[in-house]
Image: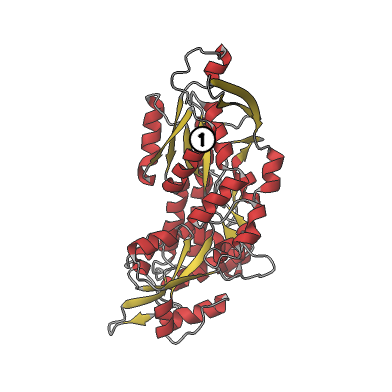
Amino acid sequence: MVAGFGCRGLSTEEQAAVKPTTLQYWTVHDNVAELRTLAEEYKRIRSYVTVNIRQVRYEEFDELFLNALADDVAPDIISIQARLLPQYVRRLAYMPPSVDVATIWVEGKYRPETIVTMEKKSMPTVNSIKKDFIATVADDVIINKKIYGLPTAVDTMAIYYNKDLLDNAGIPEPPTTWAEFLDAVKKTTKFDSEGRIVQSGTALGSGANVQYVSDILALLFAQNGIPMTVGNTVTFAQNVEKGGADSPSMQAIKFYTDFARPTSEAYTWNGDLDNSFDAFVRGKVVFYFGFSFDYDRIKAQAPQLNMDVIPLPQLNEGSPVNVANYWIQSVVAKSEHQNEAWDFIRFLTTPENIKKYTDATKQPTPLRAHIEAQKEDERLLPFVGTVLNAANWYRGNDIEVANQTLAEMADRLLEPYGETQNPFERDRAIIKNAAAVLQQTM
C-alpha cells in the first residue's frame, strides 16, 4: 500500500512515519514459523513495516552478533536467553514509555485517498510487568529500573519418562515423591555380567554428560532451602563451613552425585555414558530431566518413543520450587528503527499474541492470567503447575563459565578419595572453590 505514496496529500511528518521499514530479528530457540505468522499479522496493521526473522545457532550467536555490531549491520531485535541479559545489556536499548506509530488506510471508491493517522502507544511499565507477569520476569528484565525486553513464553523443568521401560520393570504408576523416584530408579537400572550399566534409571550424578546439570543442581539446592545465588552473591556454599556433612548444601550435592557413585545404592549413571538427552532418545534412560522445549526435539529424533511427562517431586509440597529458563525479546541499541522495533515487541507480547504463541508452541505462559487455562492441557500441566514458583538462578556476566564450573564440580566430587584425604574436607574444598569461581562471574 505504501509504495507510490509520493507526496499526494501526505504531510512531511506523515510521509516519514510511513516510510517503508525493514526490521531484522535474530532468534535462537523461538518457534520461527509462529513468529513469522505473527509478523504477517503485524504487517496487516503496520503495512509499512516488514520483519525479517533469522534463526541463529546458539553456538554461533555471540560471534555473529559482535561482528554485526562492529560492522554496523546488527539486527534490530534479538531474542536473548534471560541468563545472558546482564552480559549483553550494554548493547541493548531500554524500553521507552511509549512509541509513535502510524496507521494507513484508503478512503473513497472513485477517488481513493490515502489516510494516515498518528498514534502514541503506551509501553508496559515496571508496575504492570510486576503485576501481569510471573515474578521472575520482572526480576530478570528490569535492570536499574529500566526494562530491557519481554518474553513470549517461559520454560520450567519436569521429568520425561519412558513408559515402556517403566512397564517392563513392573511399575504401574510414575513416581510422585523423591522416595518413589529413588525406588523406581533402582528397579529400572540394569547391569551386564561385568557390572557395566546397560540401562539407566535416570541420567543424573555426573557433570559433563548431563543436560542442564546446573539447572538441576540449582533446583536441588532450592528444594533444600539454599538458593544458588541471591542477587549478585553466590550462596550455595555458605552453609558448608558450619553445617558440615549434614548441611543442606552437602545433602543436595550428595543426593545428586550418588546417582553416579558406584558405591551408592542409587548408582545408575556415570561420566562414560552418552549425553543424557541422546541416551534418553535411544531408549537407554528411563527418567530424563528437561524442559518443555525438549518435547518436540525428542519427538523429532524418536517419533516412536512411548514417553510421558511428570512434575518434579518436591521436598516441601507447601512451598514448591522450579527453575525458569527462557528467552527475552530485546531491541539492539544500535538499531536505527528502535521505535518500530519496540512497537513490534509490544505487539508480540500482548496477552492475545502471547496466548497464540504459547498455544502453538506448547510452552508455559509468562502471564499470570493464562496459567489456570494452561493447567487444563495435560501436556503442559507438568511444566506450568509450578511456573509461579519458577526462578532464574543466575544473573551474572558469564553463564557459560558458570555452567562449566558446576559441571566440573560434580565430576570432581566423583573422583576417588586419596588414602590420606578426609572425604568431607576434600568435598568442601571442591564446593567452595566452585562457588568462588562462580562469584567471579557475577
Tell me the residue that label 1 is attached to: 44
In this rendering, is residue 121 above or below 298?
above
Q: Which of 316 and 173 lies nearest the eye of the viewer?
A: 173
From the viewer's perspective, tell me whether residue 64 is left or right of residue 47: left
Nearest the viewer among 418 and 170 is 170
The residue carrying pointer 1 sits among few (fewer than 14), some (14 to 19) or many (20 or more) residues within 10 Å by Cα, namely few
* Image-based side of 330 in relation to 165, left or right: right
Query: Which quarter of the picture shows residue 313?
Result: bottom right
Q: From what the image shows, is residue 136 above or below residue 282?
A: above
Q: Give the left or right position of residue 204, taking residue 129 as reference.
A: left
Up/down of 349 relative to 288, above or below:
above
Q: Is residue 262 above or below residue 390?
A: below
Name the residue: 48% across, 34% down: 77
Residue 175 placement (x, y as % from top left): 53, 78
Q: Residue at x 62, y 71 (%)?
A: 315
Which residue is outermost to the front?
Answer: 110
Count of all numbered marks drawn on residues in the image: 1
Q: Is residue 429 visible?
A: no
How far across and how far down the image is residue 130, in percent? 69, 45
| Residue 298 rendering spot, x and y as whole percentages | 39, 63
Secondary structure at badge 1 equals: helix
Q: Quadrant of residue 22?
A: top left
- Along the line of sight, which residue is nearer the eye, 161 or 18? 18
Q: Is residue 182 left or right of residue 28?
A: right
- The residue lying toward the viewer, choosing from 410 and 197, is 197
